[in-house]
Image: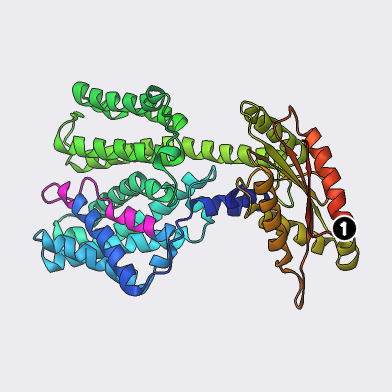
Amino acid sequence: MSDPERMAIENPQLAVAESTRWNVPALTALKTAALVLAVVLAACLVGIVTRPAGLLAAVWPANAILLGFLVRNPRLSSPAGWLAAIAAYLAADLATGASFYKTLLLTAGNMVGVAVAFALFMRFSELDRRLRRPFSVLYLGLITAAGATAAGMVGAVINPILFHGSALVGWSFWFVTEFVNYVAFLPVVLTLPAPGKSILDEWHFDRESVLRTASPFAALVAACLASVWIGGPGAVAFPVPALIWCALAYTLSGTAIVTLVFSAWTLVAISAGAIHVGADFNSGPSLLSIRIGVALMALAPITIASIIAARNEFQALLQRMVTNDPLTAALSRRAFSIRARTQLAEASASPAPVALLLFDIDGMKSINSTYGHTAGDEVLKAFVRTARARLPETDNLGRLGSDEFAVLLPSYGRQDAEGVAHRICAALRETHVPISADKSLRPTVSIGIALAHRAPASAEPLLTQADTALTRARSTGGDRHELVDDA
């Protein structure tokens, strides 16, 4: 069993947060600035490419990506990080020929919206920031709306100066543009898998059934093409059934990516005239209506995927609670028996030997009576941590009784089994278990090893042999292992 799985039993909410955290190591101010500068600058240039003449960009990912990076990596929210973001915004606009005055005003609007949204996001739990609860998408919508409102206030000042329009129109355009881009891009950044996890795993990619995996996305592509071919005011809604299918078929991060593809495609296609909606896209009312419609459509599949993710995590937690001991996170006796039966059935296909190790913590009754059951619990957890670190498969260790544990080792002969037992005894002997501010225990364990030269039908004969060997180990003082061979 992995660390996140053990954590899920002891602290489910912390486990989910840990499983999605990026855990970026501490960066120097210079490295922080360089990372933020590179990311924001690249995102700005992408947005500038989609900007119609004299208007805001049809797709502007920079603010959402910056906000997502800061939320996923609060360490980036340093003076160096914020200054690097400002420099990236300025550099992108200046490099494309904008005046410094115009660039400065646009950068102010971008930074104000990101700063407000970031401050609000950090008031919520990490689970909500990862969209891992049923109401998380609602919070996402409210927070991004607040950030877009703040940016809109700057837009109300900028629009009369730069575009000779009214303050109300400036606020409306800026608010809608910011909100739509947040909804499209931010969920992708917030739900990206942590380093070491595969995107294909996050998408539930089934290599044995590519058709089943690809069908929802293929349907979305077909619906988007139909929007171009048919056109009309309803064309933007054609992909909605496919989006819902994607939300049901893919994980939260997969759905976020699909929704981003849909949102970006729709906005760019309408802006370029590929999708004819029967109205002037660049006119004020049409622009607001279409962008808000796309944003609301994008929220629907993400909400569905978020609820499904929360349900799946809860079901997985219930399953772990049934199969694992709540104190040590080792397998329960019943789960160990089921796992052992499966392992033995697989091992019976070959003539390889199989070993079973039975563990008993020395002097547990004395520890509980002298130092209390809390100290005894810490000793049990320390043993499980120590044993797992020296077992080939960490999720096969089972707790059979109060202080009795067992593990089945298929294809392990005498030398290998005794080597594992020796390493566990030696490691536990050197383990210090704190029981107070100034006192710790150094527990020991007795181990009985049962060795079969061919896998039996069940673990019971091995457990009986191992119990005999364990009795020998305890009778000679403990802190040792003994072996019984079926030969």
Q: Position of residue 128 (x, y in %)?
A: 51, 51
* Local crowd size for mark 1, using a 10 Å CA cut-off: few (<14), some (14–19), many (≥20): few
Observer able to see residue 311:
yes
Tally the marks: 1
Q: Residue at x 89, y 67 (%)?
A: 370
Q: Determine the image quadrant of residue 30.
A: bottom left
For the residue pair 33 and 301, the one nearer the viewer reads as 33
Task: Describe residue 423's horizontal placement relative to residue 474 as left or right.
Answer: left
At x 15%, y 37%, the residue is: 272
Residue type, numbered disc 1: Thr
Q: Position of residue 251 (x, y in %)?
A: 46, 37
In magenta, the rendered stretch is: 48-69
Of the 4 image quadrants, the one containing the C terminus is top right
Residue located farthest toward the bottom when viewing the structure as drawn: 438
**In the displayed structure, would residue 119 be above or below residue 242?**
below
What residue is disc 1 on?
A: 476
Whether the magenta-drawn stretch holds residue 59 is answered as yes
Measured as percent of width and height from the top left, residue 130 is found at 48, 50
- Asked which quadrant contains residue 456, the reply is top right
**Depth order, front residue of 388/110:** 388
Indicate yes or no whether the magenta region holds residue 352.
no
Q: Nearer the viewer, residue 230 or 451?
A: 451
Residue in the image at 67% along x and 57% along y: 423
- Identified at 34% across, 49% down, the residue is 182
Please say if 185 is above or below 235: below
